[in-house]
Image (cartoon, helix red, strand yellow):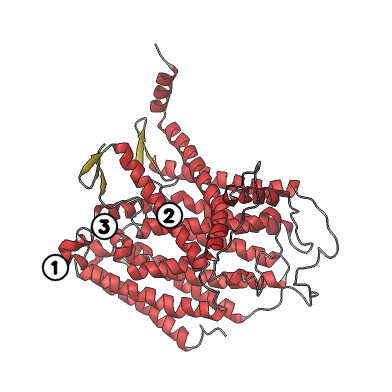
Amino acid sequence: MAFTVTVMGLLIFAAAVAANFAGMILTSTILGPKRRNSVKDQPFECGSLPVGPTHTRFHIRFYLTAILFLIFDIEVVFLYPFITILRPELGVTGLWIMGAFLAVLVFGLAYEWRRGGMEWD
Amino acid sequence: MHTALDSLNAAMSAHPLLVQALAAVAKTVFMMTVVMLIGGLILSWVERKQSAIMQDRIGANRAAILGVRAWGLFHNLADAAKGILKEDFIPPDANPFLHTLAPFLAVSTAVVAFAVLPFGGTVHLWGQSVDLTIAPLPIGILFVWAMMGMGVYGVVLAGYVSNNKFSLLGCLRATAQVISYEVATGLTVLGALLFYRSLDFRDMVAWQMGHNLGQVPFLGHLPDLGAVLAHIPAWGVFLQPLGFVLFFTATIVEMTRIPFDLPEGESEIIGYNIEYSGMKFMIFMMSEFVESLLFAWVIVLVFFGGWSLPGLHLGDGVAVLFGHALPYASGVALEAAAMALKIVFFLWFQMLVRWSLPRFRYDQIMHLGWKIMLPLALANLAVTGVLGVLAR
């Protein structure tokens, strides 16, 4: 019963949110004018003419940041259920387990730091 | 003889699921009204007026209905009408579907996160206990983080499909910045969760209402101080002062507002929403305000005791404020007012930060996120964990 009620509430809310914003976008698409011309169709680049293809290569650091994020965020997610049972149930044993887990995380961070993976210039 | 009310009561008592369904619709209407009113209309007015006051200007005050200006309040209605009636421009090389999907994703994921935020405890209707939360999920706070992570897709899509170099740069910056600080956001609340031992916001508020600082491990055992601390409620901000400061900073980065508004630094790259116009552009702006309401709400629930008011105790049908008995209804009203005031305070404080500080450089933001906030959050967690377990 409780689970049904929760899922029902979530679905009703999500449907209302989706309908609301889809409606807002749709209304403006229908009501707004459509007047195109060649200047308006150019990409907006502060008055200068666009040069070269849009989807050029970008710096490898963005890729590195994304990988760092994946590793750390997954570790953080593992910590969530762990922290809720740490104090009464696991106690000192839990501290050792968590310490070993976090040590790997911190070691990875220190290694990344020393190798210059977090340098932005 | 049956009256209409009697038959309604009979029908409601016979169908518990009907009661819950009607309650779900009512809660949805309430939450949508709050989010659209505050996030869509009032916050943009507050932003204009607060910045005007801070910069000794008058601010927007021209829009009027029948000569009534009402301190510029009608500007937001005028903006909404304008957004609907403006041309919805889609660049010729952009994918129309993805271009439209981006603002929709950005805002609707942020709004859906409100489903797990409680706005009160439990009420009893026709023998059914109805939670004043749209979806009382036991994973509460993780659902908020998940929805927040989904919001990044909207920004990435907007920048990527617009076929514009500046919007591509903006979306790369936005993605790198938001995902970097998601780690810090997730880590900084963990210290408080060690005490609450639940991911459900209702349990967090209940724990903060049911404890004082004298009962907290380590703090309560300090000589001489324990008796004084027993008079202070055990709000998350007192348990985790560093955690709160880090979390508040990380949330400002998450909503990409000044001083961390690199994705739309208008004097440099204009932003990922450069090729958007009309209602879609306004929806991107609105998602920013919706996020500031979301984070103000989460901060109040996790760090400031939710609807708890020091000195006020609500029992079974009675309310007691500093030893004086109050009508139950006024106790409930006081709690609602306390919750609303705390949220308003944080909305105001976010605006204050936004109009006080200059924008950081990009390398400074990444440096702050990975080299300062992440180690501090880890150290905070380690110290909290050791003290919390050893000093029981």
Whole-percent x, y for residue B141 in the image = 41, 57
Same chain for labels 2 and 1? Say yes or no.
Answer: yes
- Disc 2 to disc 3: CB gap under 8 Å: no
In the image, what residue type sits under mark 2?
Ile
Q: Nearer the viewer, residue B226 or B218?
A: B226
Q: Nearer the viewer, residue B56 or B217?
A: B56
Q: Is B37 on the left or on the right of B377, as rendered?
A: right
Res A105 seen here: no
Q: Is B206 on the left or on the right of A13, as rendered?
A: left
Whole-percent x, y for residue B210 in the image = 25, 52
Q: CA distance from mark 2 to mark 1?
A: 34 Å
B33 up-or-down from B161: above or below: above
Res B263 seen here: yes
Tag shown at residue B343:
2
Same chain for labels 3 and 1? Say yes or no.
Answer: yes
Q: CA distance from mark 2 to mark 3?
A: 18 Å
Q: Residues within 10 Å of mark 3 (few under 14, many from 20)?
A: many
Dot 3: what SS?
A: loop
Which chain is home to disc 2? B
Which chain is home to disc 1? B
Q: Give whichever of discs 2 and 3 has the lower sequence position.
A: 3
Q: What residue is pinned by disc 1?
A: B224
Dot 1: what SS?
A: loop
Q: Give whichever of discs 2 and 1 has the lower sequence position.
A: 1
Dot 2: what SS?
A: helix
Q: What residue is pinned by disc 3?
A: B233
